């Protein structure tokens, strides 16, 4: 039996869990290619990878590209390290290239990404670690921070926004830090920076968002790394997870805990902490308004239009912050991708301005004739945005329908939304 026969057996190019006889192994890639449901092990002990033959894409844009076998190749390709080949298929998983099918010596070979390097790129394999679907999702959500972001020393909106983006992927995180660090050559009087991480404790494998911060020149610089790991983090030693069913509330709890772990050195975050706690209280005060507005809009649509609300999501989180609202607006409804189970109702903190609230009239609705309800300006902002969502679903659809069309204004009269606040 040749070395190639033995190597292919070791690689596991077979229908798992039943191995084919050795005499058939050389023919499996070509003669049995019609069996698209065949399960194949194409990795090694350090980079295990099991694929279904149907995952091989022979129409990928990289098909036909020249490549060579890397010095890291094991199993079947060990004896072919440095040899030239051509890509004949690409295995893509969760948007990542996981492996290749290559043609060499008139035969096809399957290998994980680390074993193959394209001729037209660097001669070193990169991005060889295959992350799971959860990690790919978190990376996408945190793409704004995968690169470098600089913030003014006391600015906290970047971390708050990052935590809210993470809240779209999970209800729970554990937050830990190894402490502050200082370089020997540093001329700063305090510390140079700090690293911390958010770990998703219920993901499998564990997903880690590592944040690297550096203090310099009256700013702090933030960059993140997102990866998953099967054995590099001890799940049992993670700090107590922080969770909340409401998306914005949990993101604020994470941001507050982040400020706590950063507060021992560097900039003072006391003002930022007090501001976050205050805005959380304001958001909490709007939740009864949101529940009533949802109910009233639904009832009004049924009674007066024989229609149903068009809310695109079953859950709504209230965000009291400036960063989620378009310039010139006081409130905004935001619908995310299909994988995010909630929508966000953004309200600027200035909506709670005492002068604005003094000018807000009591609410009178046709649904409850004769009853007068005290309403703040911020309450009317919520009612306004709920009406937008119920009629149009999202901002784009609202704008296509003219935003405040005849039906919107008619509903505003029924619901007791003053016309000057409905425009």
Image (cartoon, rainbow, N blue to C red):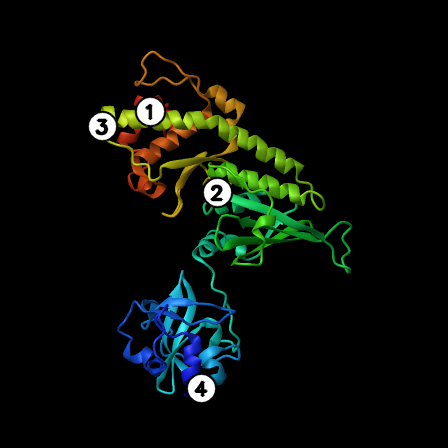
Quadrant location of the N terminus? bottom left
Secondary element at tag 4: helix
- Give the CA distance from mark 2 to mark 1: 29 Å
**Pointer 2 or 3: first along the chain:** 2
**Pointer 2 or 1: first along the chain:** 2
| 58 to 418, vertically: above or below | below
- Give the CA distance from mark 2 to mark 3: 38 Å
| 178 to 172, vertically: above or below | below
- Give the CA distance from mark 1 to mark 4: 76 Å
Picture disc at residue 314: none
Secondary element at tag 3: helix
Is 210 positioned to the left or the right of 263 in the image? left
- Give the CA distance from mark 1 to mark 3: 13 Å
Near-viewer residue (305 or 343)? 343
Quarter of the view holding residue 253: top right
| 359 to 4, vertically: above or below | above
Residue that label 4 marks: 3
Is 237 positioned to the left or the right of 30 in the image? right
Secondary element at tag 2: loop
Residue that label 3 marks: 305
Identify which residue is drawn at 41% across, 29% down: 382
Q: Where is residue 4 in the image (x, y as percent from the top left)?
A: 42, 85
Picture disc at residue 171: 2
Q: Position of residue 134 (x, y in %)?
A: 45, 54
**Pointer 1 or 4: first along the chain:** 4
Q: Do the residues labelled 2 and 1 touch (CB within 8 Å)?
A: no
Q: How crowded is mark 2: few (under 14 residues within 10 Å), some or many (20 or more)?
A: some
**Pointer 2 or 4: first along the chain:** 4
């Amino acid at each position: 039996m040749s070395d190639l026969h033995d190597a292919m057996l070791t690689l596991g190019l077979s229908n798992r869990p039943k191995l084919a006889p050795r005499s058939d192994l050389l023919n499996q890639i070509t003669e049995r290619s019609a069996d698209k449901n065949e399960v194949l092990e194409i990795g090694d002990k350090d980079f295990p990878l099991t694929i279904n033959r149907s995952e091989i894409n022979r129409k990928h844009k990289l098909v036909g590209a020249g490549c060579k076998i890397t010095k890291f190749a094991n199993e079947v390709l060990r004896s072919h390290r440095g040899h030239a080949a051509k890509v004949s298929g690409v295995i893509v998983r969760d948007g990542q290239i996981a492996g290749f099918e290559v043609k060499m010596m008139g035969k096809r070979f399957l290998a994980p990404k680390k074993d193959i390097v394209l001729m037209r790129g660097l001669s070193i394999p990169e991005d060889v670690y295959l992350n799971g679907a959860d990690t790919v999702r978190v990376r996408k959500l945190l793409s704004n921070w995968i690169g470098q972001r600089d913030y003014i020393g006391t600015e906290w909106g970047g971390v708050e926004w990052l935590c809210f983006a993470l809240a779209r992927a999970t209800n729970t995180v554990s937050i830990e830090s190894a402490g502050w660090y200082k370089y020997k050559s540093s001329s700063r009087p305090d510390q140079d920076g700090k690293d911390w991480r958010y770990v998703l404790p219920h993901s499998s494998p564990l997903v880690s968002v590592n944040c690297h911060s550096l203090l310099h020149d009256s700013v702090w610089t933030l960059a993140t790394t997102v990866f998953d790991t099967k054995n590099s983090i001890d799940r049992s030693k993670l700090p107590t997870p922080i969770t909340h069913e409401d998306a914005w509330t949990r993101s604020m709890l994470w941001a507050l805990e982040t400020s706590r772990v950063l507060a021992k050195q560097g900039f003072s975050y006391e003002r930022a902490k007090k501001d976050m706690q205050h805005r959380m209280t304001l958001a909490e005060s709007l939740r009864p308004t949101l529940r009533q507005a949802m109910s009233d809009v639904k009832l009004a649509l049924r009674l007066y239009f024989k229609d149903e609300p068009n809310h695109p999501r079953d859950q709504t989180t209230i965000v009291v912050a400036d960063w989620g609202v378009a310039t010139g607006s006081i409130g905004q409804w935001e619908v995310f991708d299909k994988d995010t189970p909630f929508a966000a109702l953004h309200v600027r903190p200035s909506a709670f301005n005492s002068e604005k609230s003094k000018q807000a009239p009591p609410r009178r609705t046709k649904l409850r004739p004769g009853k007068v309800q005290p309403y703040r300006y911020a309450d009317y902002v919520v009612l306004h945005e709920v009406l937008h969502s119920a009629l149009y679903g999202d901002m784009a659809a609202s704008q296509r329908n003219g935003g405040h069309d005849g039906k919107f204004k008619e509903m505003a009269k029924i619901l007791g939304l003053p016309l000057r606040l409905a425009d």
